[in-house]
Image (cartoon, helix red, strand yellow):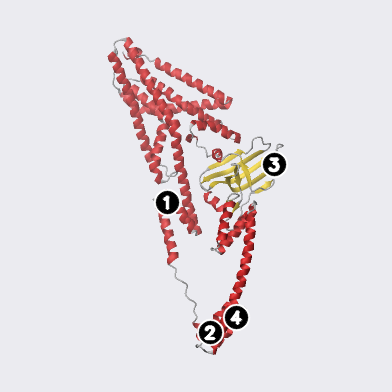
Amino acid sequence: MAKTRDDYALLRNRIIIVILSVYGLSFVGFFAYSLFTFPEKYFLHVFRVQWTPLQTLVNFIENLTPVHCAGVLLACSLFAPPQPSLKTGLEDAFTRLVFSTVIVFVLLGGVFVTLSEGLLPVLHGRLGALENRTSVARNYLELAGEARREGNRRLQNAYLEYYLSVDPDNSEALDALAELRKRSGEDAFGTSAPAPLKRARLMDLETSELLGRAMASVQEEDYYTGYYFADLAKALSPAGSPEAKQAGELAASIQRRLASFRADTEERERNAIFEIKTQAHSDLMSDELPLVARAYYTFRLLAENDPDDTEAANYLSRSVAKLKTMAFFRDEEERFASMPGANGLFFLNNEPGADTTELVAIGGIIVTEDGTYARDIEAITFGGDGGTISRFAASAGKIMKDEEDRSILYMVGIDRTDSSNTLLPEYTAGEPQDNFRIVPSLDELELLGSEGRDIASYHLHRLWGLWDILVPYGYPGDPIRIAALMRVAEAFAFIILSLLALTIGWRLRPAGGFPVVAGTAGILILPVAAYLFVRFYDYLLMLLVGSTMLAWGFTPAIIVLIALQFALIVFAIAALAAQSLKSRETRSV
């Protein structure tokens, strides 16, 4: 009996070794598959080193149940049990073998749950981050091309440098940056200075003619031209001559007149600039967006006209900071417009207890370091009687927090240089507003997009809570709860399918102790069969749980799921217990 037990312990160890070997071979296979199927359409080539191991782990974990079942089928079908001499020894050894093997399956099931619920969402999140970085970088490369076509070298240089910070070995970007810097260098150092004005013809004139032209220019109040002729006449006249003296006196008088004129002009300019700054400062202190925008344009003009005016530069900076709390700059939104984000948002925007119904549709939101931008916005508010209270549309906007930490959508876009190019929302009903309140938080907004939810990247506890977040905004929560229930079912499925694979594999074991030809051929057939069987099982389970939820609700679906898992576990245990070595030996004889 002791020998029989040792033989069964050896058989159990062989089974475990085969299962673990199948794990290792499948991991190698998934790595090779990931290595040769890198999707360059969605990821930059520079991310290949990061993507390959991540995708290998994702494929391995997502297919661990069929891989495990294939390993169990192979392990049990390749080895025959020993032939004990005592029936009691046979039954005791068989019980020990099955019990210890099931314990191993339970432990492996715990590992599977840890990987699928602990590691897998993290892996999906990292893959999503790499894909997002790829989209952002490629967007900057496209913007660099647009800036090149528009002749904006500063922006082109900035976009290329950002792209190369992500993909430093990209030959296209490197060549474009080298060409840009070459052209910028030629413009800075290769152009020749303008040729000096030729004065040969004027020098040929008589001094009297030059003086006559100088006096004529003074009569026409063209003092600069008059001074030029007088100074030239003085230079061409012999020193001490009457012409030189007359020309010198005329030039001096013109110079005094110019000095007085400049003093009067500068004083008038100082007074005018003071009045302009006073009005602009008053506008800046206002809480009205049009006045703050007017102050911004005023200080911008003053700063451009006089770069040394530190006061204008200081107030320009303050006006920009204040303007960013009330509106957005159009060039910022345009720069991020083509970047990836949550698309197709449509939700109820109702405050708790509100007697109105507000529907909001947003084409897409883009979350950046500079804020959250929105595009293709439309909202309509209905009263309790069903009448339209307000309706508007805006091509773009920026979502920011107010003092009470609420999300506010600002829809006025300011052009940095052209005050006539301001972007405003178009109201077809109701009183026009510059902004309106968004009830969902920024995190919730990303979940509301039709492409903003990657369920695989959520841990089960987070996935379970999505229903409570999304349903109040009008989103159907049943698909999310079905996905959560299927996550729960996967843990049971690993154990149930392990037991069924053990039962089937035990039935397929060879009688003589060595694999037969058919068993050897099964090495190729059984993994494929196990994969198809597990996928079919998952499909049927999802169909049953989903139809139950849609028909009767969430609670009945949980009851049906638990009852089904319990019934399947009982069936799998009963099928395993029904295996009789004696009957198998009888059939072999």
Q: Amino acid at mark 3?
A: Thr
Of mark 2 and mark 3, the one earlier in the sequence is 2
- Amino acid at pointer 2: Ala
- Label 3, on which residue? 388
Q: What distance separates the C-alpha of mark 4 from that of mark 1?
A: 60 Å
The quarter holding residue 216 reads: bottom right
Badge 1 local density, few (<14 within 10 Å), some, or many (20+)? Answer: some
Residue 355 percent across, percent down from the top left? 69, 36
Q: Residue furthest bottom?
A: 241
Question: Against 557, is 426 above or below?
Answer: below
Instruction: Kindly indicate whether the residue at mark 1 contacts the one at mark 2 (C-beta within 8 angstroms).
Output: no
**Residue with the mark numbered 2:** 233
Residue 339 percent coordinates (x, y): 51, 47
From mark 2 to mark 1, how far is it between C-alphas?
A: 62 Å
Secondary element under disc 1, as helix, strand or loop, is helix
Q: State which tag comes first along the sequence, 4 or 3.
A: 4
90 and 373: which one is in front? 373
Classify mark 4: helix, strand or loop: helix
Question: Which x, y percent locates residue 499?
Answer: 41, 21
x and y percentages locating residue 200 in the rendered image:
49, 82
Q: Residue at x 39, y 24 (%)?
A: 107
| N-terminal label among 1 and 3 | 1
Q: Which residue is mark 4?
A: 217
